[in-house]
Amino acid sequence: MSDLSASVTPAPERAGATSTQGEPAPPASGPSARTLTVAVIAGGRSSEHDVSLASGAAIREGLLAAGHEVVPVEIARDGTWRAGEEPVRVRPGEGLLGVDVVFPALHGPYGEDGTVQGLLETLDVAYVGAGVAASALCMDKVLFKRVLSATAGPGVPQVEYVGVREQRWRAAPARVLGEVAELGLPVFVKPAHLGSSVGIVKVTEPARMTDALEQALAHDELAIVEAMAVGVEVECGVLGLPLAERSAGASALAPALASEPGEVVFAGEFYDYAAKYTPGGMELVIPARISDTASARVRELAVETFVQVGCEGLARVDFFVDGESVVVNELNTMPGFTPTSVYAKLMSASGIPYPELLDRLCRLGIERHSERRGRRH
């Protein structure tokens, strides 16, 4: 980012213009109907660059459909920022391109991990989603699990795991292999800071463990080895509630709502990158084909996990469900965000259509920014 106000502020895409679907975008409506100008940041330096571009394009369309104005910002693979044809230059405390709120539609390192969130905090601009600490925490799969284990009482139930730092692996490989062997087989070996199932290897025999760890550590200095979980994969969306709803009645202790759980069905051995992003690679069944008790437990744990790790705005929490047993696998602070992505489908099935979902998230970001500016630091 060079030169930490843009030298040229691009004209925003305006609500009311004809969308790419040929439908005129309706004006914003409802009790909080002020039209917003939203910078949608997409792209980034991570291996999920193209997924982010797809999320960003869908978010822009959805915001226009909700009656808002959009300023697209693209981060190239080399990390440079552009708004249209203009490079983005920013100064601390002066916001970003004159917008009301930023929607960082970024997935993976250098975007979903607290780095961009920290920059936006420095610019003093409202933004959607988790803050700096929660973004960094949830990107680190090992630290995320340790924090959940440290919660009061029995903690949040999780898949058994072992974290492996490259330095320790190089110094004491036999000891590491011994610790990993206690998980049994099969296990899944993953880079600890990557999403979208990048770099995952399923290990079914001890002889493959060394190669699997080397592959994960080629992506990241920290790997995680997870025990095989029995049951179906279930995902649940979480959406933050505005302060007015949190302080009213039964919602007083619930800072967020959980969606109807959905069941992920795929043809391969596990839910890998191809299954996630190849057309027809997976099917999302809503509601998930689990018992009412398990469904209620999924929703309860989704909100509890969201709260324990300090998330805000939104998240998707992934589970394994076996009968009445429910265990948390991971949490994504900025899941894929096209209308056909899992999070959007879960929220739509729960009564919140895509344009309304985007509107809510932007207003939550503005509310948080306003509330925190009113505090003494």
Image (cartoon, rainbow, N blue to C red):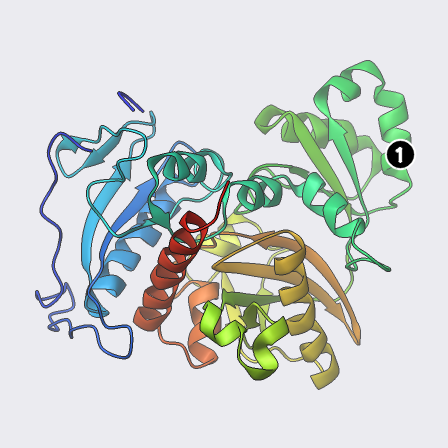
Residue 229 visible? yes
* Residue appearing at x 64%, y 51% in the figure: 309
Which residue has dot 1 on it?
A: 179
Closer to the camera in the image, 1 or 141 = 1
Closer to the camera in the image, 155 or 226 = 155
Please, is residue 55 above or below residue 173 in the view? below
Closer to the camera in the image, 256 or 106 = 256
Number of dots carrying numbers: 1
Please, is residue 17 above or below residue 8 in the view? below
**Is residue 232 rendered to the left or right of residue 9?**
right
* Residue appearing at x 79%, y 60% in the figure: 157
Give the image location of residue 122, x and y in percent. Answer: 38, 34
Closer to the camera in the image, 249 or 207 = 249
Give the image location of residue 270, x and y in percent. Answer: 64, 54
Within 10 angstroms of label 1, few (less than 14), some, or many (20 or more) residues?
Answer: some
Quarter-wise, where is residue 58 in the image? bottom left
Outermost residue, front direction? 376
Give the image location of residue 251, x and y in percent. Answer: 58, 77
Give the image location of residue 69, x and y in percent. Answer: 17, 58
**Is residue 26 rendered to the left or right of residue 232?**
left
Please, is residue 136 above or below residue 288 in the view? above
Q: Secondary structure at mark 1?
A: helix
Identify residue type, mark 1.
Glu
* Residue appearing at x 60%, y 57% in the figure: 268
